[in-house]
Amino acid sequence: MGGTVTIEGLRDFHRALRELDKKFPKALRDANFDLASEVVKRSKARGLTEGGVARKASKSLRAARSANSSVVTGGGPGYPYFFGAEFGAKQYRQFETWRGNQWEGWDGGPGYFLHPVIRSDARELVAAYMKRLDALADEAFS
């Protein structure tokens, strides 16, 4: 499954909302963006506590708008060290120890600032997200 939380039927939900009114898909995009923004906010805070290159790399985290998913991106041309800061390295001393880049489940695995936040806060964040989707469904299909 990787480091993802899958909401079964989200694409169908989006399709049904689109058929009702243009405002509903926008509300779903906003909910997805807000979830990703909260992950970014918490991950940046954790990056600050890690210090070093993680402090700089965590500044590159961004939330993106999408109708069918919550998207968090990091790195880019100004942050070529992002993945080394998040996952560590075996060879380069400016990075922490290599933790791997394969999802090992909810009890452990890779990452120094983004993935640990996903592991520790996913239940809380998904519960708040699902409440928002329930409210959207109530409004759209009442």
Image (spheres, rainbow, N blue to C red):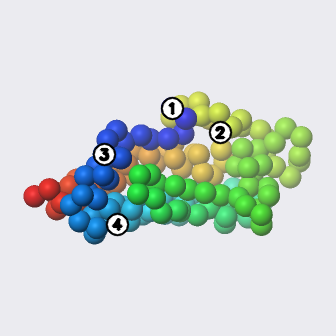
Residue at point 72%, 44% (across, down)? 87
Q: Quadrant of residue 73?
A: bottom right
Q: Is mark 2 on a helix, strand or loop?
A: loop
The Cα–Cα distance between marks 4 and 3, rounded to whole angstroms, is: 15 Å
Q: Which mark, by number, is residue 26?
A: 4
Tell me the kind of residue under disc 3.
Answer: Asp
Q: Nearer the viewer, residue 12 or 46?
A: 12
Tell me the kind of residue under disc 1.
Answer: Met
How packed mark 2 is, by other alpha carbons closer than 10 Å (few <14, some 14-19, many 20 or more), is: many
The Cα–Cα distance between marks 4 and 2, rounded to whole angstroms, is: 33 Å
Q: Is residue 35 visible?
A: no
Instruction: Tell me which label, 4 or 3, sits earlier in the chain.
Output: 3
Q: Are marks 4 and 3 in contact (CB under 8 Å)?
A: no
Q: Which mark, by number, is residue 12?
A: 3
Instruction: Tell me which label, 4 or 2, sits earlier in the chain.
Output: 4
The residue beneath circle 1 is: 1
Q: In the rendered image, which quarter contains the C terminus?
A: bottom left
Instruction: Tell me which label, 1 or 3, sits earlier in the chain.
Output: 1
Residue at point 32%, 53% (across, down)? 14
Marks 4, 1: nearer the viewer: 4
Q: Are marks 2 and 1 in contact (CB under 8 Å)?
A: no
Instruction: Tell me which label, 2 or 1, sits earlier in the chain.
Output: 1
Q: Nearer the viewer, residue 95 or 13?
A: 13
Locate residue 110 relative to residue 40 in the image: left or right: right
Q: Where is residue 97 in the image (x, y as percent from the top left)?
A: 79, 41
Q: Is mark 3 on a helix, strand or loop?
A: helix
Q: Where is residue 114 in the image (x, y as percent from the top left)?
A: 60, 51
The Cα–Cα distance between marks 2 and 3, rounded to whole angstroms, is: 32 Å
Instruction: Tell me which label, 2 or 3, sits earlier in the chain.
Output: 3
Marks 2, 1: nearer the viewer: 1
Residue at point 60%, 34% (across, down)? 103
